[in-house]
Amino acid sequence: MEIRELVKSGFVSIIGLPNAGKSSFLNAVISTNLAITSKKPQTTRKNLKGIYNDSDSQIVFVDTPGIHNVKNKLDDYMSKSITKSIDDIDLIITIIDIMTYKTDNFDKLNDILLKSDAKKLLLVNKCDLIEYKEDIILNEILDKFKNNILFKKIFFISSLKNKNVTNVINYIKEILPEGNRYYNEEDLTDEPTKQILADIIRQQCLYKLDKEIPHGIIVVINSMKKSKTKCINIDADIICEKDSHKKIIIGTKGSMIKNIGTGSRIAIEKFLNNKVNLKLNVIIKSNWRDESTLLINYGFDIKSIK
């Protein structure tokens, strides 16, 4: 019988308001751009596991959508995903944006935190952007949390500059229990490759398209095949909700879709470490965010989240 060496192991949920830097923190922890990021709200739509491994620990971080108001079935799925992420969790990390905390509404964040007895950490992010005094800001932030929400430790960090991220990991390792690894040591996530590639393409849409159009977009990988020349041929649909949006995504004489495709191909080649031929199609599916069947087809397991 194989005897596995015990390590510090457990699950850590990352929650916070939109654009607080949850996905950037996950990427900093695992030193890979696994989670897509942008300045637009609702960049993260699903819970995403990122797996930190070293010689004496395995920490499974769960990146979650930003806490937001529910307007459709996709929003409802995202909101319930956050609550689902704190079930049977070892630790909850709450991330706050130091640039916006004064005007941020913490009511829903408070409600979620009060539902769990798990240990809690508070990370104040983006500390590279301003000069600040920790004690003053900390008192102002803690005043916005309900008194019975207790944080075991508070860190001022910058995910972008990797400030204090290692100290956060070391502290988590101190408080997690000993146990077996849940995943192989070389694993960074349990997410299917096709889903990661779809998100890479959607990230380019977030970067390059203005206003509300990216919120109505979903990307689906139809096929992914390696050719005889070992180039990977990828066929993907960019699905939007309106004909007017389709025209913007395609652009004048195809300029925008070409721009999105070029950025996506470069990013995918870097991720796969392989030459890629990418074909993008733009498809209209009206109100897909409110259609249960379409949401399930697009990979949102709405039946499992109640």
Image: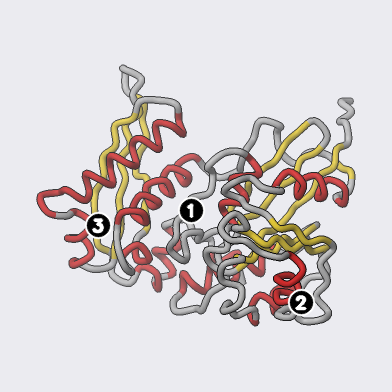
Amino acid under label 3?
Answer: Ile
Q: For numbered disc 1, what is the local secondary structure?
A: loop
Q: CA distance from mark 3 to mark 1?
A: 24 Å
Image location of residue 233, percent across then percent down: 31, 31
Image position of 129 (left or right of 233): right
Q: Residue at x 77, y 46 (%)?
A: 167
Amino acid under label 2?
Answer: Leu
- Tag 3 or tag 2, which sits nearer the N-term? 2
The image shows residue 97, relative to residue 229, as above or below, that is below
Image location of residue 90, percent across then percent down: 80, 57
Residue 216 in which image quadrant:
bottom left
Q: Residue at x 53, y 69 (%)?
A: 77
Q: How many other residues sit within 10 Å of disc 2, few (<14), some (14-19) or many (≥20)?
A: some
Q: Which disc is residue 114 wearing?
A: 2
Residue, disc 1:
37
Q: Marks 1 and 2: CB-CB under 8 Å? A: no
User: Which quadrant holds the C terminus?
Assistant: bottom right
Image position of 245 (left or right of 118): left
Front residue of this view, candidates 82 and 129: 129
- Tag 2 or tag 1, which sits nearer the N-term? 1
Q: Residue at x 57, y 51 (%)?
A: 24
Image location of residue 223, percent across then percent down: 35, 39
The image shows residue 197, relative to residue 145, as above or below, that is above
User: Which quadrant holds the N terminus?
Assistant: top right
Image position of 199 (left or right of 130): left
Q: For numbered disc 3, what is the local secondary structure?
A: strand
Q: CA distance from mark 2 to mark 3?
A: 42 Å
Residue, disc 3:
283
Q: For numbered disc 2, what is the local secondary structure?
A: helix
Front residue of this view, candidates 303 and 77: 77
Q: Residue at x 66, y 30 (%)?
A: 186
